[in-house]
Image (tube, rainbow, N blue to C red):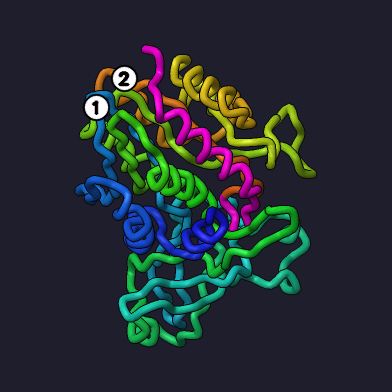
Amino acid sequence: MVKELLRKLSNAHGISGSEGSVAAVIREEVAPYVDEIREDTMGNLIAVKKGDDFSILLAAHMDEIGLMVKYVDEKGFVRFVTVGGWYDPTLYAQRVILHGTKGPVYGVVGGKPPHVMKEEDRKKPLKVDDMFIDIGATSPEDAEKLGIEVGTPVTVDREFTELANGRVTGKAFDNRAGCVMLIKTLQTVKSPHTIYGVFTVQEEVGLKGAKTVAYSLNPDCAIATDTTIPGDHPGIEKKDASLEMGEGPVITIIDSNGRGLIANKKVIAWLRAAAAGKKIKVQLEVGKGGTTDATTIHLERGGIPSTTLSIPTRYIHSPVEVLDTKDIEGGIALLVEALKSKPDF
């Protein structure tokens, strides 16, 4: 069931460079349905369904944005850096999990209370440099005994919860939603072609895993499965984002004003034809901000025809992302149908 798989993956923890626990969940879900599954040097999890000489790469990144321990100060407060793209005020007063050498350690992100701020400081957003993590330790030695050291990865302590009308909230839907699409596709699809289902690492810090795996696999075309921003809630206008939750998965035409991906027109046509044939609702995106693994994949080798299939997700890069599970189901149905054929190159 899509909802329960998303729950399991959202509740798992894995910042960029520390995706192992997420990969373990995915491997268990996928291994019985593929001909081969392996991990490469970067940590990408590669699942292969063997077919003919035409190969299609499906890529979903496993990593989530998070934090990392920089040092512990003389009073036991943990100083940290962000890993991936945070809006700094989102972090203040969050409860977090430090994944130490002796197991999880819980803490809270603290900063100067507003009660003691000067009037001019209250008008400024809190910055990460002014925050710290309080784990209850009283000294660096105390933190070390708990298994906390320089380089310890940190994630937000937030669990998946259901909202009304099939909508759900949780952390790391970017991009555990894309992972769900890819897992369910691999479990279901019957394609004459060779399918590489790759769960990539380090997307949030530079699309790194996708770059190396696209080079090594050299597929004939590729689709990244990810999330994207809808414009269907207060504070954002349709001119900024024309997409809506519940109106189907999203096929990218360009993203980041074309500085990221300009998708291959034949790959777009292939997906649109599959959607039309099965009467699957889809949306098209011409995006201004953000990009996906497809950006780096399409530039590898002599160029790999690519696009992205995304799920509209509110409040991306926060601990309370929201999506409609019907959009994920539509994305799975579209991929399963499209993979019965191939683009008309």
- Frontmost of labels 1 and 2 is 1
- On whether residue 7 falls in the magenta region, the answer is no
Crowding around mark 1 (Cα neighbors within 10 Å: few <14, some 14 to 19, many 20+) is: few
Query: For this view, does 43 lie left or right of residue 61?
Result: left
**Looking at the image, which is closer to me, 284 or 294?**
284
Residue displayed at 55% across by 66% down? 131
The x, y position of residue 227, in whole percent, is 54, 42
Please state which of residues 217 and 191 is positioned toward the viewer in this rendering: 191
**Left of 228 or right of it: where is 197?**
left
The correct choice, above or below, for 85 with respect to 195 in the image is below
Q: Quadrant of residue 195?
A: top left
Magenta highlight range: 317-345
Which percent across, then down, holds residue 293?
A: 41, 36
Amino acid on which the number 1 mark rests in the picture: Asp
Residue 156 placement (x, y as % from top left)? 53, 65
Seen at 55% across and 28% down, the residue is 251
User: Where is mark 1, residue-wise?
Assistant: 52
Q: Is residue 262 visible?
A: no
Q: Which mark is residue 303?
A: 2
Q: In the rendering, which numbered label is found on residue 199?
A: none
- 322 and 64: which one is in front? 322
Residue 67 falls in image quadrant: bottom left
